[in-house]
Image: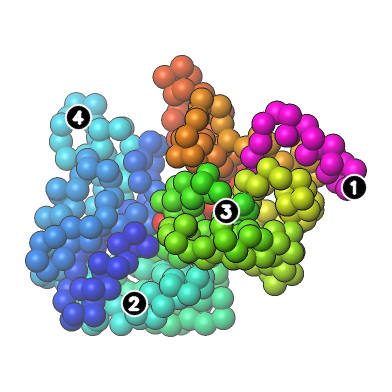
Amino acid sequence: MRDVLADLMSIWRAGGTAGMGTVVRTFRSAPRPPGASMVVAPNGSVSGSVSGGCVEGDVYERATEVARTGIPQLQRYGVSDDDAFAVGLTCGGIIDVFIEAVSQATFPELAAVADDIEAHQPVAIATVIAHPDAGWVGRRLVIRPDSVAGSLGSPRADAAVADDARGLLAVGRSEVLTLGPDGERLGDGLEVFVSSQFPRPRMLVFGAIDFATALARQASFLGYRVTVCDARPVFATSARFPTADEVVVDWPDRYLAAQAEAGAIDRYTVICVLTHDPKFDVPVLKVALRLPEVGYVGAMGSRRTHDDRVARLREAGVSDAELARLASPIGLDLGARTPEETAVSIAADIIARRWGGGGQRLAEIGGRIHHDQEVEGKLSDPLTRY
């Protein structure tokens, strides 16, 4: 939903009705993850995607119909061996898409949900996508860590789904829950898609240099909430980093320690140290490598800089186990030269560590392209998860 939220809210605030298709389940090599959405506006314009182009035409027609009738649909798209040119996924995967009408009447809580997302507050939307009683389909709960709004159809179902949804929200996962028709733990018939709108993960970039400008742009594209920090006010300016969410003038180690103390660093946070100056990077890396939870810590520099940095960190009391968490020199071996190419190299390293990719060319390896789960103990990022 996050990718289409601005367009959806424009329609909602204007009093219109949008047709929205959302991927709720995937099997095998699906092109978009659960939660990916496509919105059809009253004027026929489209935003978002559920399949990267394979089935968008059919979803468009169905979304237009649902916006008119108000009757939601759950549609499965796949491909069969004997009819590879039917409406389906040419990649061989299968997706379930829930198509519903969204308006002030059908989703009165949407403005509050949008406010939560804008404020980086966790919120989950639980929507009934299947039930023996068609009147339940399309009903929803809005679940926050400390509150629930709406109803699915019964107090028992509301309580069961809210409990499970909070568990999914805590780990940033979006998936379908299956329960008995009244929310019974043993049974089926009630299917509820929980869309976890987890706060955007943070990327902290230390060092206001030209490489940081390119990395901030790349990270914003990937969905990170980017902070650039440098102790030098002449370089740390919003004008130099227009795509960063915030630019902070402070000593990197002091800022990072304060953020950790405030609880603003978690296992989704990415830390990139680009200063390659010992008086900046050694103190901040000492703090970063000792944080109990952080998704990724990388530092820029040549091999010689890396060796000198490691020696200085050891002198500062950083252990070998802590040093093992450091990605240095930062990035994958792409042969990058320019700041923009280097930013792609760093982003590729972060993605590979998150999903367990080896960084090889796909054309030269076998097996499935997509990894199903994030690597245990490595970067776990719900982003897009949206």
- Distance from the alpha carbon under mark 3 to that under mark 1: 27 Å
- Say what secondary structure mark 3 lies in: loop
Please state if 21 lies on the left or on the right of 240 as rendered: left
What is the CA distance from the residue labelled 2 to the residue labelled 3? 38 Å
Asked whether the beta carbons under mark 3 and mark 1 sit within 8 Å of each other, the answer is no
- Mark 3 lies on residue: 208
Q: Is residue 74 visible?
A: no
Closer to the chain start, of discs 4 and 1, is 4
- Residue 312 against residue 283 in the figure, above or below: above
Q: Report the residue marked by disc 1.
A: 317
In the rendered structure, find residue 110 and report the number of the disc placed on it. Answer: 2
Gap in Å between the C-alphas at discs 4 and 1?
Answer: 61 Å
Q: Which residue is mark 4?
A: 84
Label 4: state its secondary structure: loop
Viewer-nearest of discs 2 and 3: 3
Report the magenta residues as a range: 298-321
Side of 257 relative to 153 (left or right): right
Q: Residues within 10 Å of mark 2 (few under 14, many from 20)?
A: many
Say whether disc 3 or disc 1 marks the residue closer to the N-terminus.
3
Q: Is residue 267 left or right of residue 74?
A: right
Q: Quadrant of the C terminus?
A: bottom left
Nearer the camera: disc 4 or disc 2: 2
- Badge 3: how crowded within 10 Å, few (<14), some, or many (20+)? many
